[in-house]
Amino acid sequence: MYLASRKEIAREIGTLWQRNATRFGGVPLHPSGERSYFEFVADNAGELDARRRWQMVFQQTLIATIVLGLFVSNTASSISMVRARPRALATWCCLLQSVAGIMCAVYVLTTGAPGGPSCREILWVMTACIRINDLCGSTVLLQKAYIARGSSRWLLAFIPVVAVAPIPILYATWSSPAILNSTSGGCVFIYPIYFPWMRFGFHAPINLALTVIFIDVAYRQYQRFGSDAWRKLARDGIQVGLLLLVVNMLCTFAIALEVFGIYSIALTIVEW
């Protein structure tokens, strides 16, 4: 599969389309991004292009179905946790993440139906849900680190960063052109060149700080409990926290470096 770069696709669509483009809140809407997958497949196209379009629809439907199943399972687990600990912030964050995932997956699945949502609407909903995930995930990890460090007040400095970060990231994605065509490989944002590094700037510092904290806690637990430390870390949630941070850091670097071209941003879904 050919992975187009952001520059290649941006060069392909150009900028002239913005002159007469319909605008939503000042954001120019690319005509191809206003089509649904149903309209995309229904267009008259050559045999090879039509095959590519059907492949994209199938891939998206398969991914959305798998994601829906995962989040339904997560929601059931989250409800159980909320019932067991209704006053715990982490359990409610997990439930909010899971419900947002179900809503997002169901919304994506409707795009193949007549009158379904457009490419732009799908991407806007997905990015909003991913920002909810970022906010909830960072909140849970920050709270866990705060407790693990014995309520160290310097960690509270990250609260404004966690709260504010989704706003500029969401605006940068929503204000970027959304296009849907077989050349680009489907429904994608043509985000500005600064976007991956802006996201990196918001995520990397707090992820690095929390990773160092959790590794320090793991090391202290090992010194104290020896081979039994790993079981205690799993029980206290430190093990899962470290795993989340490692995945987050890998995805953050891959997105910033555009390892998979413009599709690197899709790693946010993998991370979620």
Image (cartoon, grey):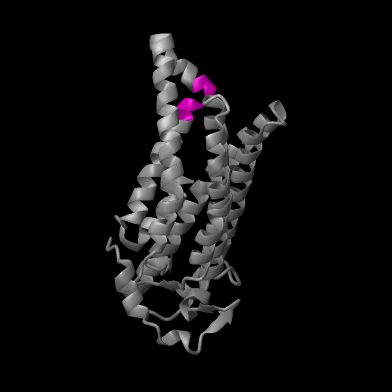
Of 267 and 77, nearer the camera is 267
Residue at horizontal 67 percent and vertical 35 percent from the top: 79
Residue at horizontal 33 percent and vertical 73 percent from the top: 9
**Rendered location of residue 56, percent (x, y):** 41, 63
Residue at horizontal 52 percent and vertical 78 percent from the top: 29
- Numbered range of the magenta stretch: 234-240
Q: Give the answer, above or below, for where 246 lies relative to 182.
A: above
Q: Looking at the figure, which quarter contains the N terminus?
A: bottom left
Of 74 and 215, nearer the camera is 215
Q: How would you classify the magenta stretch by its main secondary structure?
A: helix
237 in magenta: yes
In the image as oriented, which residue stretches furthest toward the left? 2
**Rendered location of residue 185, percent (x, y):** 36, 66
Q: Give the answer, above or below, for where 217 lies relative to 97.
A: above
Can residue 89 be seen? yes
* Quadrant of res 115: bottom right
In the image as oriented, which residue stretches furthest toward the bottom? 20
